[in-house]
Amino acid sequence: MAKPTRSNDWGFPRWRGYGSARDAEPVRLCDRHGCDEPGDRPAPKSPNSRERWYFCERHAAEYNRNWNYFEGLTVEEAAAREADEQRGANGYRQAGHYGWGGPGDGSRSRDEMRALEALELESDAEFDDIRAAYRRLAKLNHPDARPGDAEAAARFQAIQAAYEVLRKAEERRSAA
């Protein structure tokens, strides 16, 4: 009796890596006649149809240029579809806090980016620039320099808070 052979996909840990099959990966080509680019951008064949064409990026852009998503629908049906899709898309808003705080290389937190904005600085400002901007703005908005101006006092407090955030972040970076 012949001994049965096992595949390498059994047990834990797997004895073969994921995606390391010996078969070639199938590549779907663009559905545009004569194009030999990969067709990785789905586009509906007609309004309200689940069937899809698969185009390359260039032909998908050409196809979508004159596309009317709400063609053939009444105004009420179009409004209902738009509201339904918006409701479905709003589910992703809860993950918005995972996004970047703003431009830059990712070395600054969202609070630091807001502080730089309060000090009217770019995202790549050095600490010497931060200190100079703080002093300049503090002199302009200090309550002693502008007595009785409530807006200036509020701006001065915001500038102070922004400088403290950036100063503490700089101390943490220099200590590490």
Image: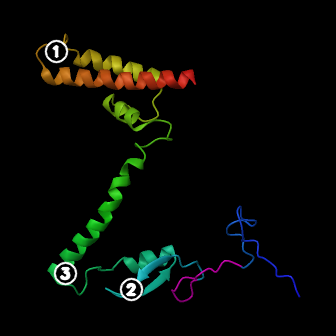
Q: CA distance from mark 2 to mark 3?
A: 18 Å
- Residue 168 is situated, as x and y percent measured from the top left of the image, at 44, 22
Query: Which image quadrant is residue 5 in?
Result: bottom right
Residue extending furthest toward the top: 144
Residue type for callout 2: Arg
The numbered mark, 3 or 1, whose residue comes first in the sequence reads 3
Q: In front here: 15 or 111?
A: 15
Q: How many residues crowd around disc 2 within 10 Å: few (fewer than 14), some, or many (20 or more)?
A: few
* Spot occupied by residue 152 in the image (x, y as percentages of width and height): 18, 22
Q: Is residue 174 visible?
A: yes
Instruction: Say which quadrant the C terminus sits in.
Output: top right
Question: Mark 2 to mark 1: distance in Å?
Answer: 66 Å
Q: Quadrant of residue 4?
A: bottom right
Vertical side of 41 occupied by 136: above or below: above
Task: In the displayed orientation, state which residue is furthest to the right.
Answer: 1
Magenta portion: prevailing SS class: loop
Residue beneath disc 1: 146
Identity, as a three-letter code, of the amino acid under mark 1: Arg
User: Which is nearer the N-term, disc 2 or disc 1?
Assistant: 2
Residue 132's image quarter?
top left
- Give the quadrant of the N terminus: bottom right
Q: Count how many numbered circles sit on residues in the image.
A: 3
Do the CB atoms of the residues marked 2 and 3 lie less than 8 Å apart? no
Q: Which three-letter amino acid code belongs to the residue tagged 3?
A: Glu
* SS at mark 2 in the image: loop
Label 3 to label 1: alpha-carbon separation: 58 Å
Q: Give me the disc on residue 78.
A: none
Question: What span is colored magenta in the figure?
Answer: 24-35
Q: Position of residue 75 (x, y in %)?
A: 15, 80
Dot 2 or dot 3: first in sequence order is 2
> Which secondary structure lies at badge 1?
loop
